[in-house]
Image (cartoon, rainbow, N blue to C red):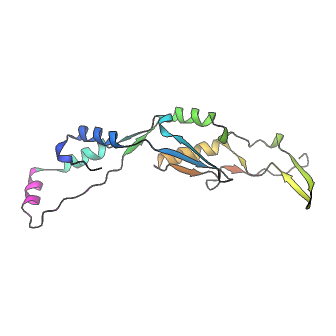
């Protein structure tokens, strides 16, 4: 991120990196391809670099610096840090419970299954296929966040269920 680490203590460098890091948005794609996004600020998403910075700091020594300094080809090592992320699971669940696009519609009782007719002829109208399971959707989003991924395709993650037809339908 363009910070020269020697000028900072581990805590100061962590604070600078956290200031320079924007809170990402999370993207949800449904089976029709509609895209929904929400800011991870809603769930108090936070990224922290301190553990990695402290490990690097602890591995440094005066002897190592002297060896590096007297090498013929002085070079600098660029280190990429991956932050440890955290968020409030309760806030995530509360937010996901409130959004309309993740509304559970896996109960087939109110779904229409019937034969209809249009200008092309007869066809099966079936609302009981690919019903969203809210529980599976929340689980997929939570798993993605835990892996540091900021998008999920609900259809790819098998968050939709197929309901078997019964004689009552």
Which of the pair 120/72 is nearer the observer?
Answer: 120
Hey, which residue is sitting farthest bottom in the picture?
Answer: 72
Residue drawn 53% across the image and 32% down it: 91
Residue drawn 91% across the image and 45% down it: 168
Q: What stretch is highlighted in magenta?
A: 62-78
Looking at the picture, does residue 122 appear above or below residue 103?
A: below
Coordinates of residue 34 in the picture (x, y in percent): 64, 50
Which of the pair 125/136 is nearer the observer?
Answer: 125
Coordinates of residue 46 in the picture (x, y in percent): 41, 38
Which of the pair 45/107 is nearer the observer?
Answer: 45
Q: Can residue 88 be seen in this view?
A: no
Residue 75 forms part of the magenta stretch? yes
Coordinates of residue 109 in the picture (x, y in percent): 83, 40
Q: Can residue 129 be seen in this view?
A: yes
Residue 59 forms part of the magenta stretch? no
Looking at the picture, does residue 41 appear above or below residue 140?
A: above
């Amino acid at each position: 991120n363009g910070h020269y680490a020697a000028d900072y203590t581990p805590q100061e460098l962590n604070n600078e990196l956290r200031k320079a890091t924007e809170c990402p948005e999370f993207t949800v794609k449904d089976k029709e391809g509609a895209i929904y996004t929400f800011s991870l600020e809603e769930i108090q998403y936070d990224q922290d670099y301190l553990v990695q910075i402290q490990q690097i700091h602890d591995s440094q020594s005066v002897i190592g610096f002297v060896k590096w300094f007297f090498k013929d080809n002085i070079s600098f090592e660029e280190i990429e840090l991956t932050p440890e992320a955290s968020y409030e699971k309760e806030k995530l669940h509360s937010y996901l419970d409130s959004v309309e696009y993740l509304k559970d519609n896996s109960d087939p009782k109110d779904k229409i299954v019937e034969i209809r007719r249009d200008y092309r002829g007869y066809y099966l109208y079936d609302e009981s296929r690919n019903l969203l399971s809210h529980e599976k959707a929340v689980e997929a989003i939570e798993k993605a966040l835990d892996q540091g991924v900021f998008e999920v395709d609900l259809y790819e993650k098998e968050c939709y269920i197929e309901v078997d037809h019964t004689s009552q339908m």
